[in-house]
Protein backbone atom coordinates (compact mmCIF):
# COMPACT_ATOMS: atom_id res chain seq x y z
CA UNK A 1 0.00 0.00 0.00
CA UNK A 2 1.28 3.47 -0.90
CA UNK A 3 0.77 6.30 1.58
CA UNK A 4 1.01 9.86 0.33
CA UNK A 5 1.35 13.11 2.23
CA UNK A 6 -2.13 14.56 2.51
CA UNK A 7 -2.36 18.32 2.12
CA UNK A 8 -4.53 19.63 4.93
CA UNK A 9 -5.76 23.02 6.03
CA UNK A 10 -4.92 24.43 9.44
CA UNK A 11 -7.29 24.97 12.35
CA UNK A 12 -8.25 28.54 13.20
CA UNK A 13 -6.21 28.25 16.41
CA UNK A 14 -3.14 27.26 14.41
CA UNK A 15 -3.77 30.05 11.92
CA UNK A 16 -3.95 32.47 14.84
CA UNK A 17 -0.46 31.47 16.00
CA UNK A 18 0.86 31.65 12.44
CA UNK A 19 -0.70 35.09 11.98
CA UNK A 20 0.88 36.36 15.19
CA UNK A 21 4.31 35.08 14.19
CA UNK A 22 4.09 36.41 10.65
CA UNK A 23 3.14 39.82 12.00
CA UNK A 24 6.20 39.80 14.25
CA UNK A 25 8.31 38.93 11.20
CA UNK A 26 6.76 41.88 9.37
CA UNK A 27 7.42 44.22 12.29
CA UNK A 28 11.02 42.99 12.37
CA UNK A 29 11.46 43.75 8.68
CA UNK A 30 9.88 47.18 9.24
CA UNK A 31 12.47 47.81 11.95
CA UNK A 32 15.19 46.77 9.51
CA UNK A 33 13.77 49.26 7.00
CA UNK A 34 14.09 52.03 9.58
CA UNK A 35 17.77 51.28 10.14
CA UNK A 36 19.10 50.24 6.73
CA UNK A 37 21.44 52.83 5.20
CA UNK A 38 24.92 53.09 3.66
CA UNK A 39 27.60 52.05 6.13
CA UNK A 40 25.41 49.62 8.05
CA UNK A 41 26.35 45.95 7.68
CA UNK A 42 24.44 42.70 7.81
CA UNK A 43 25.75 41.80 11.25
CA UNK A 44 24.31 45.05 12.63
CA UNK A 45 20.89 44.25 11.20
CA UNK A 46 21.02 40.64 12.33
CA UNK A 47 21.64 41.60 15.96
CA UNK A 48 18.90 44.22 15.80
CA UNK A 49 16.45 41.64 14.47
CA UNK A 50 17.35 38.95 17.00
CA UNK A 51 17.08 41.31 19.96
CA UNK A 52 13.73 42.60 18.71
CA UNK A 53 12.27 39.13 18.18
CA UNK A 54 13.42 37.88 21.58
CA UNK A 55 11.89 40.94 23.27
CA UNK A 56 8.44 39.59 22.36
CA UNK A 57 7.59 37.00 25.00
CA UNK A 58 8.84 33.53 24.13
CA UNK A 59 9.40 34.31 20.44
CA UNK A 60 12.74 33.20 19.02
CA UNK A 61 14.38 33.55 15.60
CA UNK A 62 12.95 30.89 13.32
CA UNK A 63 16.00 30.46 11.12
CA UNK A 64 18.87 30.52 13.63
CA UNK A 65 20.12 26.97 14.14
CA UNK A 66 17.57 25.49 11.72
CA UNK A 67 19.39 23.06 9.42
CA UNK A 68 22.54 24.61 10.93
CA UNK A 69 21.94 28.15 9.62
CA UNK A 70 24.01 30.51 11.81
CA UNK A 71 21.93 33.72 11.85
CA UNK A 72 18.53 35.28 12.48
CA UNK A 73 18.21 36.84 9.02
CA UNK A 74 19.06 35.65 5.54
CA UNK A 75 20.67 38.76 4.03
CA UNK A 76 21.36 38.50 0.30
CA UNK A 77 22.63 41.61 -1.52
CA UNK A 78 22.72 42.17 -5.27
CA UNK A 79 23.61 38.92 -7.10
CA UNK A 80 22.91 36.83 -3.99
CA UNK A 81 19.49 35.24 -4.43
CA UNK A 82 18.71 33.85 -0.96
CA UNK A 83 20.25 32.30 2.17
CA UNK A 84 23.02 34.88 2.50
CA UNK A 85 24.83 34.85 5.85
CA UNK A 86 25.08 38.30 7.48
CA UNK A 87 28.63 39.70 7.47
CA UNK A 88 30.55 42.90 8.21
CA UNK A 89 30.55 44.23 4.63
CA UNK A 90 28.94 47.71 4.73
CA UNK A 91 26.03 48.36 2.42
CA UNK A 92 26.46 51.15 -0.13
CA UNK A 93 24.40 53.29 -2.47
CA UNK A 94 22.91 51.27 -5.33
CA UNK A 95 22.75 47.99 -3.41
CA UNK A 96 19.61 45.91 -3.33
CA UNK A 97 19.31 43.64 -0.31
CA UNK A 98 16.91 40.71 0.03
CA UNK A 99 16.14 40.05 3.69
CA UNK A 100 14.26 36.91 4.73
CA UNK A 101 13.13 36.53 8.35
CA UNK A 102 11.49 33.80 10.40
CA UNK A 103 9.98 33.60 13.89
CA UNK A 104 9.06 30.59 16.04
CA UNK A 105 6.62 30.70 18.96
CA UNK A 106 3.77 28.59 20.35
CA UNK A 107 4.90 25.66 18.22
CA UNK A 108 4.49 27.47 14.89
CA UNK A 109 6.59 29.50 12.47
CA UNK A 110 6.24 32.84 10.73
CA UNK A 111 8.00 33.68 7.47
CA UNK A 112 8.28 36.67 5.11
CA UNK A 113 10.86 38.44 2.94
CA UNK A 114 11.39 41.81 1.27
CA UNK A 115 14.03 43.25 -1.07
CA UNK A 116 15.24 46.72 -0.11
CA UNK A 117 17.10 49.18 -2.33
CA UNK A 118 19.65 51.74 -1.12
CA UNK A 119 18.99 54.97 -3.02
CA UNK A 120 19.86 55.74 -5.80
CA UNK A 121 19.31 52.68 -7.99
CA UNK A 122 19.30 52.18 -11.75
CA UNK A 123 15.92 52.13 -13.54
CA UNK A 124 16.31 48.49 -14.61
CA UNK A 125 16.99 47.46 -11.01
CA UNK A 126 13.91 49.34 -9.86
CA UNK A 127 11.90 47.54 -12.52
CA UNK A 128 13.22 44.17 -11.31
CA UNK A 129 11.97 44.92 -7.80
CA UNK A 130 8.61 46.16 -9.04
CA UNK A 131 8.07 43.12 -11.26
CA UNK A 132 9.06 40.65 -8.55
CA UNK A 133 6.80 42.33 -6.01
CA UNK A 134 3.87 42.48 -8.44
CA UNK A 135 4.41 38.84 -9.43
CA UNK A 136 4.06 37.87 -5.78
CA UNK A 137 0.57 39.35 -5.66
CA UNK A 138 -0.38 37.70 -8.95
CA UNK A 139 0.61 34.39 -7.41
CA UNK A 140 -1.37 35.16 -4.26
CA UNK A 141 -4.49 35.76 -6.39
CA UNK A 142 -4.27 32.08 -7.37
CA UNK A 143 -4.16 30.85 -3.74
CA UNK A 144 -7.74 29.54 -3.69
CA UNK A 145 -9.19 26.06 -3.13
CA UNK A 146 -10.19 25.74 -6.79
CA UNK A 147 -6.57 26.18 -7.93
CA UNK A 148 -3.38 24.14 -7.99
CA UNK A 149 0.26 24.92 -7.33
CA UNK A 150 0.80 25.11 -11.09
CA UNK A 151 -1.68 27.99 -11.30
CA UNK A 152 0.33 29.95 -8.74
CA UNK A 153 3.59 29.21 -10.54
CA UNK A 154 2.18 30.00 -13.97
CA UNK A 155 0.92 33.42 -12.85
CA UNK A 156 4.35 34.33 -11.49
CA UNK A 157 6.37 32.87 -14.36
CA UNK A 158 4.24 34.33 -17.14
CA UNK A 159 4.42 37.83 -15.71
CA UNK A 160 8.17 37.74 -15.01
CA UNK A 161 9.40 35.87 -18.08
CA UNK A 162 6.88 36.43 -20.85
CA UNK A 163 5.73 39.95 -20.03
CA UNK A 164 8.93 41.41 -18.58
CA UNK A 165 11.75 39.14 -19.86
CA UNK A 166 13.31 38.46 -16.47
CA UNK A 167 14.11 34.92 -15.24
CA UNK A 168 12.45 32.90 -12.49
CA UNK A 169 14.71 30.67 -10.39
CA UNK A 170 13.70 27.01 -10.74
CA UNK A 171 15.55 25.22 -7.94
CA UNK A 172 14.13 27.26 -5.04
CA UNK A 173 10.42 27.30 -4.24
CA UNK A 174 7.78 28.42 -1.78
CA UNK A 175 6.31 25.97 0.71
CA UNK A 176 3.67 25.08 3.22
CA UNK A 177 4.04 26.67 6.65
CA UNK A 178 3.05 25.41 10.09
CA UNK A 179 4.78 23.58 12.92
CA UNK A 180 7.66 23.17 10.49
CA UNK A 181 9.13 25.99 8.45
CA UNK A 182 8.97 23.90 5.30
CA UNK A 183 5.88 21.74 4.92
CA UNK A 184 4.15 20.29 1.87
CA UNK A 185 3.28 21.36 -0.71
CA UNK A 186 6.13 22.95 -2.58
CA UNK A 187 5.03 26.16 -4.34
CA UNK A 188 7.21 26.63 -7.46
CA UNK A 189 7.39 30.02 -9.12
CA UNK A 190 6.85 28.37 -12.49
CA UNK A 191 4.34 25.85 -13.80
CA UNK A 192 1.33 25.09 -15.95
CA UNK A 193 -2.28 26.03 -15.34
CA UNK A 194 -4.29 23.23 -13.78
CA UNK A 195 -1.23 21.15 -12.89
CA UNK A 196 0.43 20.37 -9.59
CA UNK A 197 -0.96 19.84 -6.10
CA UNK A 198 -4.53 20.93 -5.46
CA UNK A 199 -4.81 23.69 -2.87
CA UNK A 200 -7.30 23.26 -0.03
CA UNK A 201 -9.23 25.60 2.24
CA UNK A 202 -7.21 26.93 5.22
CA UNK A 203 -3.89 25.64 3.88
CA UNK A 204 -1.09 28.02 4.87
CA UNK A 205 1.62 28.56 2.27
CA UNK A 206 4.58 30.85 1.73
CA UNK A 207 4.70 32.26 -1.80
CA UNK A 208 8.11 33.71 -2.64
CA UNK A 209 9.17 34.57 -6.19
CA UNK A 210 12.93 34.77 -6.70
CA UNK A 211 13.58 36.60 -9.95
CA UNK A 212 16.86 37.29 -11.75
CA UNK A 213 17.51 40.24 -14.02
CA UNK A 214 19.65 37.96 -16.21
CA UNK A 215 19.65 34.18 -16.65
CA UNK A 216 17.76 31.79 -14.38
CA UNK A 217 20.79 29.65 -13.50
CA UNK A 218 22.13 29.77 -9.95
CA UNK A 219 25.05 28.38 -7.97
CA UNK A 220 26.12 28.05 -4.35
CA UNK A 221 28.93 29.97 -2.70
CA UNK A 222 31.72 28.19 -0.78
CA UNK A 223 30.02 29.00 2.55
CA UNK A 224 27.54 26.23 1.75
CA UNK A 225 24.53 28.51 2.14
CA UNK A 226 24.49 31.56 -0.08
CA UNK A 227 22.79 31.09 -3.45
CA UNK A 228 24.20 33.34 -6.21
CA UNK A 229 23.17 34.01 -9.80
CA UNK A 230 25.62 32.29 -12.16
CA UNK A 231 25.90 35.39 -14.34
CA UNK A 232 26.47 37.55 -11.21
CA UNK A 233 23.59 39.86 -12.14
CA UNK A 234 21.11 41.08 -9.50
CA UNK A 235 18.21 39.07 -8.13
CA UNK A 236 15.12 40.06 -6.12
CA UNK A 237 12.99 38.14 -3.63
CA UNK A 238 9.63 38.96 -2.03
CA UNK A 239 7.61 36.63 0.20
CA UNK A 240 4.22 36.55 1.89
CA UNK A 241 2.71 33.81 4.03
CA UNK A 242 -0.98 33.39 3.22
CA UNK A 243 -4.02 31.30 4.09
CA UNK A 244 -5.82 29.70 1.15
CA UNK A 245 -9.43 30.91 1.33
CA UNK A 246 -12.35 30.45 -1.06
CA UNK A 247 -13.05 34.20 -0.95
CA UNK A 248 -9.40 34.99 -1.74
CA UNK A 249 -6.13 34.44 0.09
CA UNK A 250 -5.66 36.00 3.53
CA UNK A 251 -2.27 37.64 4.06
CA UNK A 252 -0.65 36.64 7.34
CA UNK A 253 2.40 38.84 6.79
CA UNK A 254 2.17 42.59 6.21
CA UNK A 255 4.37 44.41 3.69
CA UNK A 256 2.50 47.67 4.20
CA UNK A 257 4.19 48.38 7.52
CA UNK A 258 7.55 47.64 5.90
CA UNK A 259 6.80 50.04 3.07
CA UNK A 260 5.72 52.73 5.54
CA UNK A 261 9.17 52.47 7.16
CA UNK A 262 10.78 52.69 3.71
CA UNK A 263 8.85 55.90 3.00
CA UNK A 264 10.28 57.42 6.17
CA UNK A 265 13.88 56.44 5.37
CA UNK A 266 15.53 58.86 2.93
CA UNK A 267 18.30 56.35 2.26
CA UNK A 268 15.96 53.76 0.73
CA UNK A 269 14.41 53.85 -2.73
CA UNK A 270 10.63 53.68 -2.95
CA UNK A 271 9.23 51.11 -5.37
Image: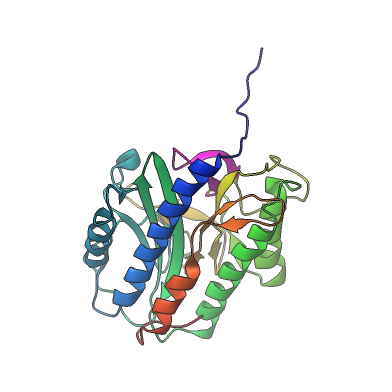
Q: Nearer the viewer, residue 41 or 136?
A: 136
In this rendering, position of residue 136 left or right of residue 29:
right
Residue 157 percent across, percent down from the top left? 67, 60
Residue 12 percent across, percent down from the top left? 55, 43
Residue 119 appearing in the image: yes
Residue 36 appearing in the image: no
Residue located at (71% from left, 62% from top)? 158
Question: How many discs appear?
Answer: 0
227 drawn magenta: no
Magenta range: 172-186
Q: Nearer the viewer, residue 255 or 66?
A: 255
Q: Is residue 71 above or below residue 30?
A: above
In this rendering, position of residue 107 left or right of residue 57:
right
Q: Is residue 262 above or below residue 230?
A: below
Residue located at (64% from left, 56% from top)? 249
Q: Nearer the viewer, residue 9 or 262?
A: 9
Amino acid sequence: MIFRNRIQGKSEDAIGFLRENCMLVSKTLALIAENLKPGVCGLDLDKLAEDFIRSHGKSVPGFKGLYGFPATLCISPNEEVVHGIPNNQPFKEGDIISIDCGVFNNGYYGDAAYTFAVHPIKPQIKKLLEVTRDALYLGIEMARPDKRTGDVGFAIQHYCERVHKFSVVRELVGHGLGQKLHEPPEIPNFGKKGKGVKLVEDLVIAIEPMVNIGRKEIGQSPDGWTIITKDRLPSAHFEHSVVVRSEGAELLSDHKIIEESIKNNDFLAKI
